[in-house]
Amino acid sequence: MRILVTGGAGFIGSSVCRHLAADEGNHVVNVDKLTYAGNLDSLRSIENRPNYVFHRLDICDRAALLDLMRAADIDAVMHLAAESHVDRSIDGPAAFIETNVVGTFQLLSASLDYWRELPPARREAFRFHHVSTDEVFGDLPFDDSLFTETTPYKPSSPYSASKAASDHLAHAWHATYGLPVVLSNCSNNYGPFHFPEKLIPLVILNALHGQPLPVYGEGTNVRDWLYVEDHARALELVVRKGRPGESYNVGGKAERTNLSVVETICDLLDRKRPLDGGSRRRDLITFVKDRPGHDRRYAIDCGKIERELGWQRQESFETGLEKTIDWYLANEWWWRPIREKRYAGERLGQAAG
């Protein structure tokens, strides 16, 4: 399968590219604008493979996208390009509307033009896979309720609102024009090559250096954590086997409060890389003013993708987190330039306050 992956230099996108390129039967065409979180170092292991190629391209450039689809003879599009950090969306929502909404519109439009040019058998087999987030559903109370594929949308942040809009566009291009669209909505991802503005990599690197560990509010907000390589396997199943017009939720079945996540990281690092003098990293935890509009709880019912497509997670939160910490300990070459030149861990998302 010849697959165009947008946002393939990002966290989830690079995991998808590495996963797909491991199969010599795939040809992976990676398109990324290389904004602040895009990092070609994340693709070093596959950059010289004959079945992988990178193009620096903005998904808002419809004509260039269409030209590339034609030249690469694409069988499927996996759309992961997005601005994705809630805090940054609070400080500057315009970039989220431009990339997540306008960019998705341009990509859908280019894909529709390309799809209409294909012979009938290839039109039937073509897929446009729109990759999204559980944040479009808003939040849940502190009970045993779960997001399903039919949960009404109720986004709380500029980020989740922009992703909700893009989801609706993808659905509309299927319903109106017949484009074979499949969607997926995932819970919080974590794992190797994660830009260190998000909770888990930020806490790992701050804790590694004995720096304060900021926790929003009282740390009671709950997230469902999904190991990124488990997610990449799910996404391939969706693009290969998903039914056009359908959505598939992907979760890790690993609900944890933010505070418990931070405490677990502290305890693992204390065991693996003790601080001088034997001090406890839990003492570095610092409670800070909460994020505006901070959703209480996310939790995914992923029964549909398990039943229909045969997906199962391979990592528990405990095994996945330990793998993640071990990766950061062993790969300073990847994260140190980011901390020194792009993002040093400063607080974001305070513009609304």
Image (cartoon, rainbow, N blue to C red):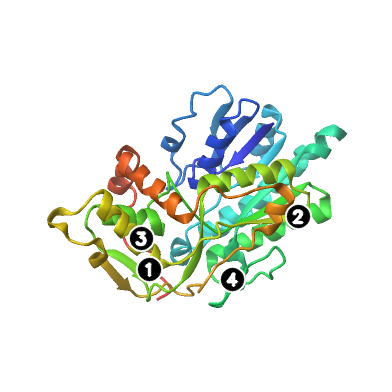
How far apart in space, not on screen, are marks 2 and 1 (Cα)?
35 Å
How far apart in space, not on screen, are marks 4 and 1 (Cα)?
21 Å
* Residue type at tag 4: Gly
Extreme residue toward the top, this view: 50
Residue matched to label 4? 138
Camera-nearest label, 3 or 2: 3
Tag 4: Cα neighbours inside 10 Å, few (<14), some, or many (≥20)? many
Residue matched to label 1? 259
How far apart in space, not on screen, are marks 2 and 4 (Cα)?
20 Å
Q: Residue at x 57, y 31 (%)?
A: 21
Place residue 140 in its image quadrant. Answer: bottom right
How far apart in space, not on screen, are marks 3 and 1 (Cα)?
9 Å
Rendered-image quadrant of the N terminus? top right
Q: Residue at x 55, y 52 (%)?
A: 82
Rendered-image quadrant of the C terminus? bottom left
* Residue type at tag 2: Glu
Q: Earlier in the sequence, mark 4 or mark 3?
A: 4
Number of the label disc, if any, that sits on residue 264:
3
Camera-nearest label, 3 or 1: 3
Number of the label disc, if any, that sits on residue 246:
2
Tag 1: Cα neighbours inside 10 Å, few (<14), some, or many (≥20)? many
